[in-house]
């Protein structure tokens, strides 16, 4: 599992380690890893033009010491000092001893334009808000230049703890981060600025409880339900799907499709799209008597394509089994009824739906995804799967938020969310907790999206069709 820790936690771990190491040893570890990553990116160091954008403090020191190492290997290194009076004294001396030069920000545009590699050491993990004018101007030139841009620990101008970008920021091709990932490297919009991320181990001792978690294949494989010789369709779990309407029968079909690929032993469908569901999936158990009289289920999915049918949502919320609420169900669900539930609830909004529930503009949710997911989970006392360019799973009980590392932009297609709802609901019925069902469902859904698209447009039914391949890929790995 990949983990990310807050700035406060990282700072505490750094202080503890520095107390046991010779003075400056920790910075040298970071600089060595940073210089090695730059060398790998360049391929050949000798004769290359490298420009360091150096701010104050330790982040600039890391860049200066790494620049000194690269200068000793024959690179032409120039440090643009954005705060000359506060540049790291030891790092600056090391760079000069190695033959590196310094320059002022004024007139540094030509240096940046001609560079082969630009090292961003402007602001460290404690930085807040966008870049100051001099730095913003050079970052803009760097984005237009041919130089490869490497960020030190994280791109300057992004918020390490939240992933928010409030102003101008550096866009990196590679971010070399030290000790652990920071939340901002895994969450959009900041993630878009980080490029590829390379983690350098500098020996930090970090607590077990992280700020953010990203599942990997092995974690998902351990959570997936596996039938035994004693299993039958009912022991494996039955998921109920209350979805679809005369206007949106396809939502019901796609939710059932996802559910059938999600590990539960059977799928019960209730709603006005029964004919369409049976025509496509004759194995579905269909009822026309509403959720209350559909028969026993271990979990419900309610809302995809439901239109204005609030009665089904109310009946499902009154049940004593786990419930996944999606799409129209989010709009129709009474917040007090959700909060009053004793069984787990998983809500799966996209940014627009989350914004409506929170009463804020959509842009606010997209710009502060982590805070929005946590706020919504607390407000509804539910687990929230916030879909989007970064899918997050936040639990009302607190703890680490999970960020989904799989997916493709091609998943932004009609019906894709319906497939995810059915899949995650099926995992709920199989016995997974709401956070596990949400994060495992998002992982498989994203992986299936990659397999189905393979770099080309894809439909929601293609994603559902690729779920068995994604499942096998996870378990066989």
Image: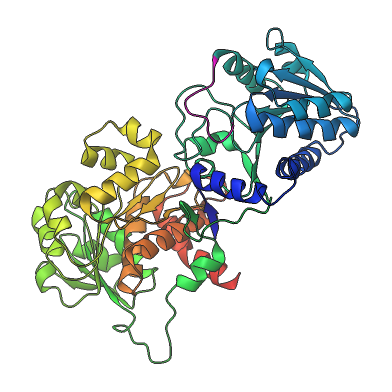
Q: Is residue 399 above or below residue 65?
A: below
Q: Which residue sits at x=11%, y=65%?
A: 318
| Nearer to me, 109 or 463 | 109
Image coords of residue 354 (percent x, y): 28, 42
Residue 295 highlighted magenta (yes or no): no
| Residue 420 location, quadrant | bottom left
Q: Does residue 288 show up?
A: no
Magenta segment boundaries in residue numbering = 124-132
Residue 129 highlighted magenta (yes or no): yes
Say which quadrant the C terminus sits in: bottom right
Image coords of residue 341 (percent x, y): 16, 63
| Nearer to me, 340 or 430 | 340
Q: Which residue sits at x=36%, y=69%?
A: 427
205 left or right of 366? Answer: right
Image coords of residue 458 (percent x, y): 47, 49
Q: Which residue sits at x=50%, y=23%?
A: 130
317 left or right of 363? Answer: left
The outermost residue toward the top is 107
């Amino acid at each position: 599992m990949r983990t990310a820790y807050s700035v406060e936690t990282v700072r505490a771990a750094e202080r503890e380690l520095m107390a046991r190491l010779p003075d400056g040893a920790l910075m040298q570890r970071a600089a060595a890893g940073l210089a090695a990553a730059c060398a790998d990116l360049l391929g050949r160091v000798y004769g290359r033009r490298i420009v360091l954008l150096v701010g104050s403090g330790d982040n600039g020191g890391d860049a200066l010491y790494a620049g000194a190492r690269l200068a000793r290997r024959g690179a032409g290194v120039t440090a643009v000092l954005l705060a000359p009076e506060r540049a790291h004294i030891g790092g600056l001396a090391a760079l000069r001893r190695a033959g590196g030069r310094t320059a002022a920000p004024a007139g540094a545009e030509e240096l940046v334009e001609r560079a082969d590699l630009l090292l961003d050491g402007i602001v460290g993990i404690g930085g807040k808000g966008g870049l100051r004018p001099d730095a913003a101007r050079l970052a803009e030139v760097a984005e237009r230049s041919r130089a490869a841009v490497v960020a030190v620990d994280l791109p300057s101008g992004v918020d390490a703890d939240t992933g928010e970008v409030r102003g101008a920021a550096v866009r990196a091709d590679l971010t070399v981060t030290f000790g652990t990932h920071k939340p901002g490297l895994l969450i959009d919009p900041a993630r878009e600025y980080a490029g590829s991320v390379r983690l350098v181990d500098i020996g930090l001792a970090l607590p077990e409880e992280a700020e953010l978690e990203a599942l990997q294949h092995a974690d998902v494989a351990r959570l997936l339900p596996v039938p035994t010789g004693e299993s039958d369709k009912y022991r494996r779990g039955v998921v109920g799907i209350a979805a679809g309407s005369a206007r949106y029968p396809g939502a019901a079909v796609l939710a059932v499709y996802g559910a059938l690929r999600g590990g539960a032993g059977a799928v019960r469908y209730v709603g006005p799209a029964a004919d369409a569901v049976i025509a496509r999936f004759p194995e579905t158990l269909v009822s026309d008597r509403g959720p209350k009289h559909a028969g026993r289920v271990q979990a419900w999915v309610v809302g995809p394509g439901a239109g204005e049918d609030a009665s089904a949502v109310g009946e499902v919320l009154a049940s004593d089994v786990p419930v996944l609420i999606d799409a129209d169900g989010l709009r129709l669900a009474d917040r007090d009824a959700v909060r009053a539930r004793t069984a787990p609830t998983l809500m799966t909004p996209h940014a627009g739906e989350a914004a409506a529930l929170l009463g804020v503009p959509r842009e606010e949710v997209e710009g502060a995804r982590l805070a929005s997911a946590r706020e919504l989970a607390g407000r509804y006392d539910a687990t929230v799967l916030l879909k989007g360019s970064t899918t997050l799973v936040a639990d009302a009980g607190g703890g680490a938020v999970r960020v989904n590392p799989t997916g493709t932009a091609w998943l932004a297609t009609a019906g894709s969310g319906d497939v995810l709802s059915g899949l995650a609901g099926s995992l709920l019925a199989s016995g997974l907790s709401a956070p596990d069902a949400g994060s495992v469902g998002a992982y498989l859904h994203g992986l299936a999206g990659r397999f189905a698209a393979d770099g080309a447009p894809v439909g929601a039914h293609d994603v559902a069709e690729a779920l068995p391949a994604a499942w096998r890929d996870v378990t066989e790995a």
